[in-house]
Every structure is written in C-alpha cells, then in structure tokens.
Amino acid sequence: MNKIIPSVVLTIICVVASLLLVFAHDLTKENIDKQKELKFSSSVEALFGKTESKLVEGDFGDGIEAIAVTPDGKTAVQVTADGYSKGGINILVGIDENGSISGIEFVSLGETPGLGSKVRDIPTFREQFYGKKDSGEIQLDAVSGATFSSRGMESAVKKALDTYNNNKEAILNAGK
C-alpha cells in the first residue's frame, strides 16, 4: 500500500504538468505564428521594398521554409541550412524578375558570434552571390575563420536558386 501511494502521486503530478504544457502551447502558438509571419514579411520588405507578396503553397524540399512572390515576379525563398551550427543559417534569398539573385536577408543566424556571424556582418561576402542565375555560377570566396558558415551560406543560396529554377513556372503562376 505504501508503494502505491507515491506512484499515484507522481502520476497525478505528471498528468497535471502535461496538461499545463499543452495549455501553454495552445495559448502561445498563435502569437508565435504571427511573429514568424511578421519577421518573414519584414525580411521580404527589406529585400524588395514596400510591396505585397503572396506565399506559394507546396513542398519544395528539405530546408526550404517558405517562398513568396510579388505581383511583379520577384521571389523570396526562405532557406535553413547548416553552418557550424546545425540549422544555424536561416536566410531569405531575393530573386528578381529576371531570375538573378538580387539580395540576401538574414531571418536568423545561430553561428558563433565574431566568427560565423561574419557571413552576415561583411557585406561583400553576401554580394558575391548577387547577379547569379544558376547555382553552377557560384564560386565561393569564404570568410577567413568562418569556413563552415561560409559553406553553409553557399549551400543555402544554391538550394534557393535551384528550387527557384526547378519550380519557376509554378512559383511565378502562384503570384498572379
């Protein structure tokens, strides 16, 4: 009898804690989704200026978080890739109406401050990707001391460009 009571008490505590976690998740889920949407919209705005954009529905593969297209055919592809940290690079790659990379905005960066964060902090690093239309055109000039982060950026940009090129018609038609 004495051994059953602690088991029952622990079970009740676990059930109550689980219910509280579910309640907290349901309570905050909508706010978290809104914040993600606002961050995405502000990143699209940073790439293309004040414009409307429409999210493209579909599964575009591993690492592709979202794709948005503007009425004038500009596309933003949100990609998550591994740098030094697993999933540490989350960027938005802007592709203009001609299919060329026109900008890169960081949604989040979980790389080592002062080392891996150089891929965000050195503008010329990002600019080496601008104007490229095909992932085969990209020749990486890595940031010294941030090789893994540089390769992660290269991988993310290539993934965004390949996704755009392989799904161009579907993406652009979704924006109309």
Image (cartoon, rainbow, N blue to C red):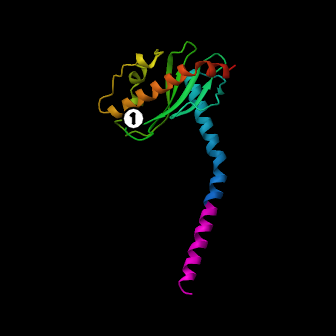
Q: Which residue is mark 1?
A: 117
Instruction: From the viewer's side, name the closer residue of 49 and 100.
Output: 100
Task: Find out whether residue 14 is within the magenta segment.
Answer: yes
Q: Residue at x 42, y 37 (%)?
A: 82
| Place of residue 71 in the rendered image (x, y in percent of width and height, measured from the top left) | 67, 18
Instruction: From the viewer's side, name the closer residue of 38 and 88.
Output: 88
Number of marks in the rendered image = 1
Instruction: From the viewer's side, name the closer residue of 75 and 28.
Output: 75
Q: Where does the magenta region start and end?
A: 1-20
Q: Residue at x 59, y 30 (%)?
A: 42
Badge 1 crowding class, 10 Å Cα cut-off, few under 14, some 14 to 19, many 20 or more, is: some
> Residue extending furthest bottom?
1
| Place of residue 10 in the rendered image (x, y in percent of width and height, measured from the top left) | 56, 74
60 horizontally vs 83: left or right: right
Which image quadrant for residue 2? Answer: bottom right
Which image quadrant for residue 49? Answer: top right
Up-down: is 119 above or below 1? above
Up-down: is 14 above or below 1? above
